Image: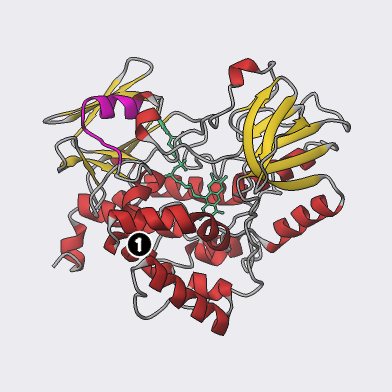
């Protein structure tokens, strides 16, 4: 969309799913799945902050809260289609699965159908890497239907009755979705959600977030924590976390690798539940499931599973417990280690040395303008990465408010529009 807006180079969009422009997040049709970010902050265009709420208003939908994710998917699809209509010759949409790419004087992308698509530049915007089974769990050793590897594509509730137990691995945002979907699909048995600490995402406050901090807080982890705690005592923890938003990327970029590693080791679980919150309505549904005894959150470590028997060690305990479960759903989140990734396209680029993992193994290494770093340690001009793949460089590159800006900036670079706008001078 931004390439079209900036009169940039012609683009070819390769998509393997039938849901163009929706990705995993906005393909689910269930209206119970709401955005985790207020509609007012979900414009796809950073230079038009009211774009999504205006779109909602045109459809008579209230825009002050958390819209259904399916509706957001409609918005994205329509935005892409409307933009394409402005000059259909400048955006081609190719339906296919990209399985390999060569990067040389040009870029050649091979599709599973055998077709080859060529261009001058390749932008990897393939989203999160698919989840993998946690260590200690061998899905091949479980009976068919016992394990759901991917909650977005597996059968969560099929064949289960009211006496059955579903174990969800992970207690983050994906677990919230899986618990709601189990309920919506008529599952009336018990749900147990297990994670190391048993921490749940917090709920959003009824009021919108405050403006961002005017100055960047300290980069050093202990000093940063002290500053945030002080602000939390003054303005509440939600506001203290939210006002960091304009600075999170620059804090991460300014940190050394050991500082970033310290943050990941000690603060990440806390950051995740305070930063990535859920809509108040969703939080109420989760509260009711817990109050009815249908959802239990437990903290501990999975040790293994054989058929129906799951063994685990409760947090802080030194004994092993067993649990009888009828289905295990993996909600541990996307896989991030490029070297264990089985996606053929990324494998081919990794094997040829065009992409490399970032030092903390959060995705693909890039420089600050999203150029992929190759095996020689240098960025090239033909290969870029966008979105969650670039978390190692930018950290907060998960939600729309961050990704839209990254995509906008890259489109302007590829269109040489940053020189016209002046921000490159
Ligand atoms: C369940 C869920 C809910 C979320 N809710 C919110 C929210 O409320 N608010 C918010 O701001 N953020 C939310 N996010 C985060 C965020 O919006 C997503 O991370 C974001 O959509 C990522 O965008 P993307 O374009 O990088 O990747 P995706 O949206 O995942 O799109 C990648 C696309 O690439 C295609 N693809 C991948 N590999 C290939 C290949 N080899 N060949 C062809 N096609 C390929 C995929 O089919 C997919 O359509 C949510 C994320 C998830 C998973």
Instruction: Using the image as rendered, state which of residue 321 and residue 185 is in the foreground.
Output: 321
Residue 425, placed above or below residue 93 = below
Taking 35 as reference, is 365 left or right? left
Instruction: Using the image as rendered, state which of residue 204 and residue 407 is in the foreground.
Output: 204
Instruction: Using the image as rendered, state which of residue 90 and residue 416 is in the foreground.
Output: 416
**Residue 6 seen anywhere in this rendered image of the structure:** no
Residue 144 drawn at (x, y percent) = 68, 16
Residue 279, placed above or below residue 422 = above
Residue 49 drawn at (x, y percent) = 45, 67
Instruction: Residue 103: say if magenta.
Output: no
Residue marked by disc 1: 249
Mark 1 Cβ inside 8 Å of ligand 1: no
Q: In what element is the residue under mark 1?
A: helix
Residue 166, placed above or below residue 69 = above
Residue 120 drawn at (x, y percent) = 18, 36
Residues drawn in magenta: 345-357
In this view, the residue farthest toward the front is 318
- The residue at 35%/62% (across/down) is 249
Residue 240 drawn at (x, y percent) = 51, 75
């Amino acid at each position: 969309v931004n390439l079209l807006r900036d009169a940039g180079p012609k683009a070819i969009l390769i998509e393997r799913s039938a849901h163009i422009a929706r990705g995993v997040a906005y393909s689910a049709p269930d209206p119970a799945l709401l955005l985790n970010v207020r509609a007012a902050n979900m414009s796809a265009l950073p230079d038009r902050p009211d774009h999504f709420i205006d779109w909602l208003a045109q459809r008579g939908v209230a825009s002050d809260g958390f819209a259904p994710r399916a509706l957001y998917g409609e918005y994205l699809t329509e935005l892409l289609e409307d933009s394409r209509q402005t000059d259909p010759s400048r955006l081609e949409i190719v339906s296919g699965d990209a399985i390999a790419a060569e990067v040389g004087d040009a870029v050649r992308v091979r599709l599973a159908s055998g077709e080859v698509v060529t261009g001058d530049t390749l932008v990897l915007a393939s989203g999160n890497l698919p989840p993998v089974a946690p260590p200690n769990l061998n899905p091949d050793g479980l009976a068919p239907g016992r394990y759901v590897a991917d909650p977005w594509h597996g059968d969560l509730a099929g064949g289960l009755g009211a006496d059955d137990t579903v174990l969800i691995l992970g207690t983050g945002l994906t677990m919230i979705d899986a618990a709601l979907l189990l309920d919506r699909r008529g599952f009336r048995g018990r749900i147990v959600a297990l994670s190391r600490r048993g921490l749940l995402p917090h709920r959003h406050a009824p009021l919108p977030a405050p403006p961002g901090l005017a100055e960047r807080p300290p980069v050093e982890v202990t000093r940063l924590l002290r500053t945030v705690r002080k602000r939390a005592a003054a303005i509440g923890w939600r506001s203290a976390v939210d006002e960091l938003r304009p600075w999170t990327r620059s804090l991460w970029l300014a940190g050394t690798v050991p500082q970033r590693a310290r943050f990941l080791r000690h603060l990440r679980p806390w950051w995740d539940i305070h930063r990535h919150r859920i809509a108040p309505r969703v939080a109420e549904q989760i509260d009711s499931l817990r109050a009815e005894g249908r959802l239990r959150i437990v903290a501990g470590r999975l040790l293994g599973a054989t058929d129906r028997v799951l063994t685990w060690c409760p947090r802080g305990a030194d004994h092993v417990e067993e649990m009888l479960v009828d289905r295990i759903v993996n909600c541990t989140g996307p896989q991030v280690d490029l070297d264990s990734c089985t996606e053929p396209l990324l494998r081919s680029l990794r094997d040829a040395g065009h992409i490399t993992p970032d030092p903390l193994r959060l995705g693909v290494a890039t420089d600050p303008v999203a150029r992929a770093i190759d095996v020689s340690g240098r960025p090239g001009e033909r290969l870029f990465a966008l979105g969650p793949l670039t978390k190692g460089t930018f950290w907060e590159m998960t939600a729309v408010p961050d990704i839209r800006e990254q995509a906008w900036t890259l489109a302007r670079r590829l269109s040489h529009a940053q020189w016209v706008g002046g921000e490159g001078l």
